[in-house]
RNA sequence: CGGGGCGUAGCGCAGUCCGGUUAGCGUACCUGGUUUGGGACCAGGGGGUCGCAGGUUCGAAUCCUGCCGCCCCGACCA
């Protein structure tokens, strides 16, 4: 077990916190609730970005960038949205500092430099973007408008956790405008599919696709679609959302287009986003008491080669084999690190790369040189085996696929084991307290019932899944009629 | 915003209750040597505004007052 890393079974949340820090993903900054994403953590995020960005481009979207600041009058234009975020907005009220006359060397806010119109630091960009779209859209020929931006946003959260909820976070937000309702809904669903595909194929993390209930819906949206993942501690995590905005923002910002018939109509909108929260999801979906377990497709280093040697001469001999292997793997587009530092021992390196989740480790030592072999270890199962040097490349290449599939399968099995259907409220509570996970139960469709359940059990309705099957029943809480079972869980 | 905790070397901590050598330990770092198939060892060395500001005292990391910051637990949320 990794030095100083708490066990998941003893304290899951401490395990998470420590892992994030020890694996060099991120650390707390001197600013409350904000984090520094460290190079290793950031390179995972970059890999996520690259994969997602390609998927966005492949579905016809273009990137753009809109400002960080939102004038208050713009921000409040869409009332529901403004209301929803009002409690957690950072606001810029002044534009200048000056020397403190009473305290040499210190600065104070210059009271004379008060802004007439306060600027809200964006908690999301609908307001700025829709006020811009007003100028970009005149006719049906300008539609659809398919824009994404990679940006930071600020939400003044009361309680924060590295990656899972920070006051400032990085994300992408797609904002599209369409001429018909149907097209906008299709876009909303398409992007949900993109997210689900990304989660499953790249993060190796199975997700439920569904629709949020009214109380969980994005403020200002008609419908919020989401992907929900299950973490190893049995809590659910919303990993991405895609919103059908109807004409709400178009009306708030007066974005109309002339149709072929010359009639003016409001455009239909969508917005969708995933954030650095995905880092938290990735960590909690696969990692173990030894450290991170990264899917090969997102691992900054896919293969690490550790030489075992005495003296420079031996290192040179080992290096010959190692460098050759490295080149051959790189030719297959596999990222390889050859760690030939003589400043730490092989054992130390083994532990270190396990902590960091490197999928495959190769060790080459004098014994191997004699036998023409090397040792290959996989992070997900901790299996080690000796291979002929000439078989290594093919085997490692195969491992990239195998590990990706194995951890995905493991996560699917875990989710299956932790998804429970219940009929009664007693059963519901028992499952929540014993194993957690997704709990499927009948619900009468009212916000009141949902609230009561949340209050009493801390579980929320994660979503009504897209493959929701109609099945008459009675609500486990109120006994009123229900159309089918929805997914409950305690969530992050 | 409530409750709790913490702030002493890069990191992790002891020392604070009960004031008193030159502020200590582990780890990391530097030098030299021996090592290296699962977090090596020996020897030597460098590194501190004890969170900040006042106060009490012959003397403050330690006591008093005020402030600041961060973390954790709750209410709110992606």
Image (cartoon, coloured by chain):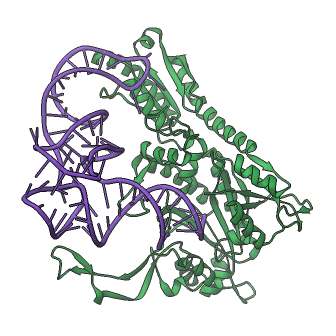
Chain colours: A green, B purple
Task: Kindly identify the residue that appears in the image at 57 percent across and 30 percent down.
Answer: A397
Please state if B25 lies on the left or on the right of A441 as rendered: left
Q: Quadrant of the C terminus of chain A?
A: bottom right
Please determine whether, in this image, residue A115 is positioned above or below residue A152: below
| Percent coordinates x, y for residue A315 in the rendering | 33, 19
Instruction: Tell me where residue A40 sits by quadrant.
Output: top left
Quarter residue A257 falls in: bottom right
Pick whichever, A487 or A247, lies toward us. A487
Image location (x, y in percent) of residue B8:
25, 50
Direction right: furthest residue: A472
State the image coordinates of residue B71 (x, y, percent, origin top left). 44, 56
- Residue A277 in the image: state x and y as whole percent: 54, 56
Direction top: furthest residue: A370
x 37%, y 58%: residue: A29
Task: Decide which of A320, B64 is in the foreground and name it.
Answer: B64
Where is A472 relative to B67, above or below?
above
Instruction: State the count of labels.
Output: 0
Which residue is found at the position 70% from the left and 71% from the top? A215
Locate residue A24 relative to residue A235 in the image: left or right. left
Report whether A72 appears left or right of A416: left
- Residue sitting at x 43%, y 8%: A370
Side of A124 where A37 appears, left or right: left
Q: Nearer the viewer, residue A246 or A213?
A: A213
Which of A171 and A265 lies nearest the eye of the viewer?
A171
Asked whether residue A418 is in view, the answer is yes
Q: Is residue A147 at all visible to an observer of this figure?
A: no
């Amino acid at each position: 077990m990794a030095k100083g890393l708490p066990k998941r079974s003893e304290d899951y949340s401490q395990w998470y916190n420590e892992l994030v820090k020890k694996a060099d993903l991120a650390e707390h900054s001197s600013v409350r609730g904000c984090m520094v994403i460290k190079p290793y953590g950031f390179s995972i995020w970059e890999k996520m970005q690259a994969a997602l960005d390609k998927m966005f481009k492949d579905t016809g979207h273009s990137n753009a960038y809109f400002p960080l600041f939102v004038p208050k009058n713009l921000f409040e234009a869409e009332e529901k949205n403004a209301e929803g975020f009002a409690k957690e907005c950072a606001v810029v009220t002044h534009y200048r500092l000056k020397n403190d006359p009473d305290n040499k060397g210190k600065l104070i806010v210059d009271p004379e430099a008060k802004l007439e119109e306060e600027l809200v630091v964006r908690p999301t960009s609908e307001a700025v973007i829709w006020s811009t779209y007003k100028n970009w859209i005149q006719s049906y020929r300008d539609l659809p408008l398919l824009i994404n931006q990679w940006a930071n946003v600020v939400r003044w959260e009361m309680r924060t956790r590295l990656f899972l909820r920070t006051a400032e976070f990085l994300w992408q937000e797609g904002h599209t405008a369409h001429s018909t309702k149907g097209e906008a809904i299709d876009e909303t669903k398409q992007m949900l599919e993109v997210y689900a595909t990304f989660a499953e194929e790249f993060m190796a993390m199975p997700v439920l696709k569904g629709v949020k209930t009214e109380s969980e819906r994005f403020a200002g949206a008609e419908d919020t679609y989401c992907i929900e993942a299950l973490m190893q501690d049995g809590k659910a995590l919303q990993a991405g959302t895609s919103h059908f905005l109807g004409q709400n923002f178009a009306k708030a910002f007066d974005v109309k287009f002339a149709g072929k018939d010359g009639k003016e109509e409001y455009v239909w909108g969508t917005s969708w986003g995933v954030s650095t929260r995905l880092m938290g999801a990735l960590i909690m979906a696969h990692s173990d008491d030894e450290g991170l377990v990264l899917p090969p497709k997102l691992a900054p280093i896919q293969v690490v080669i550790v030489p075992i040697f005495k003296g420079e001469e031996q290192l040179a001999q080992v290096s010959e084999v190692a460098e050759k292997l490295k080149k051959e793997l790189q030719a297959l587009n596999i990222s390889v690190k050859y760690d030939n530092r003589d400043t730490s021992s092989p054992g130390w390196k083994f532990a270190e790369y396990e902590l960091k989740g490197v999928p495959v480790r190769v060790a080459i030592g004098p014994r191997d040189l004699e036998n023409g072999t090397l040792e290959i270890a996989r992070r997900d199962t901790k299996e080690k085996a000796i291979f002929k040097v000439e078989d290594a490349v093919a085997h490692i290449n195969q491992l990239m696929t195998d590990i990706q599939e194995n951890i995905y399968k493991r996560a699917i099995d875990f989710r299956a084991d932790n998804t429970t259907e219940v009929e009664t409220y007693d059963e519901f509570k028992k499952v929540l307290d014993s194993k957690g996970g997704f709990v499927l139960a009948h619900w009468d469709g009212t916000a009141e019932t949902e609230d009561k359940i949340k209050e009493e059990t801390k579980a929320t309705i994660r979503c009504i899944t897209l493959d929701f099957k109609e099945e008459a029943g009675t609500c486990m809480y109120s006994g009123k009629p229900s159309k089918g079972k929805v997914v409950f869980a305690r969530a992050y």
